[in-house]
């Protein structure tokens, strides 16, 4: 199961560790190499949330209610209060195993994410992405209700493509490289707002 919470200053060391992963370094434009850089990055994410222009989530693993762990699963899978889990007020705890960000870009919302090596291949990213997309489109506290969600990933990043499709984003096309902002060709996936 996946749950979402806000990034906290105490997550800085985990961020640095995850950013040392060769796959992360291959696909991401931003690399966090020190705790100081990670703390600055976390502060930037929180400023975007306060401004209503960007909402960034730490993805954490949550207990599966089928395992008898109790009520946390409902919030984690979006049932009965996705907004609480998604906006950080739901109390999702644990070490982050991924990142998910929603950023206002004109009339659309850009979606970006990454997953730590330890969490890949288990559906954590696709469940978190689906949860965040539902929150963005439906939650009363979302600044993005009604907007189209657009997700770009590098051509060749097949894992990100599978994640987007599994989370309900349809493939819409390919965008050519346009340096410096888009240094390589990208696949575009979309999900219409609610």
Image (cartoon, rainbow, N blue to C red):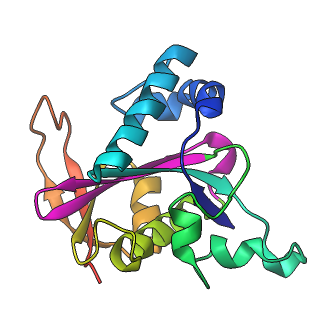
Q: Quadrant of residue 110?
A: bottom left
Of 143 and 151, which appears nearest the observer? 143
Please name whichever residue, 43 or 32, is drawn nearer the observer in this view of the structure: 43
Point out the stretch of residues depicted in magenta: 98-121
Q: Position of residue 165 (x, y in %)?
A: 40, 71
The residue at 65%/53% (across/down) is: 60
On the picture, is 83 further left or further right than 74?
Answer: left
Position of residue 172 relative to residue 101, above or below, is below
Which residue is pictured at 57% across the width and 69% down the height?
84
Estimate the x, y position of residue 179 in percent, counting from the top left: 11, 31
Q: Quadrant of the N terminus?
A: bottom right
Answer left or right for 154 relative to 135: left
Residue 117 shown in magenta: yes
Q: Is residue 155 visible?
A: no
Task: Please check the rendered image and state whether residue 45 is part of the magenta-colored stretch, yes or no.
Answer: no
Give the x, y percent position of residue 125. Answer: 54, 59
User: Is residue 94 rendered to the left or right of residue 166?
Assistant: right
> Is residue 95 visible in the rendered structure shown here?
yes
**Residue lying at the far right of the rendered structure:** 68
Q: Quadrant of the C terminus?
A: bottom left
Please state the horizontal and vertical placement of residue 149, each as a whole percent of the image: 26, 67
Q: Give the main secondary structure of the magenta stretch.
A: strand
The residue positioned 16% from the left and 34% from the top of the image is: 181
């Amino acid at each position: 199961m996946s749950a979402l919470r806000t990034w906290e200053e105490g997550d800085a060391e985990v961020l640095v560790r995850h950013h040392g992963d060769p796959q992360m370094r291959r696909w991401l434009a931003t690399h966090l190499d020190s705790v100081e850089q990670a703390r600055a990055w976390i502060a930037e994410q929180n400023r975007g949330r306060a401004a209503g222009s960007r909402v960034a989530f730490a993805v954490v693993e949550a207990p599966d209610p089928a395992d008898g762990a109790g009520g946390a699963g409902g919030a984690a899978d979006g049932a009965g209060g996705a907004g609480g889990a998604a906006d950080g007020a739901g109390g999702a705890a644990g070490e982050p195993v991924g990142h998910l960000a929603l950023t206002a870009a004109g009339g659309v919302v850009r979606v970006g994410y990454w997953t730590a090596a330890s969490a890949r291949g288990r559906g954590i990213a696709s469940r978190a992405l689906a949860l965040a997309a539902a929150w963005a489109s439906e939650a009363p506290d979302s600044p993005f209700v009604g907007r189209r969600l657009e997700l770009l990933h590098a051509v060749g990043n097949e894992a990100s493509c599978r994640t987007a499709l599994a989370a309900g984003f349809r493939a819409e096309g390919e965008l050519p490289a346009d340096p410096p902002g888009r240094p390589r060709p990208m696949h575009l996936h979309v999900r219409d707002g609610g």
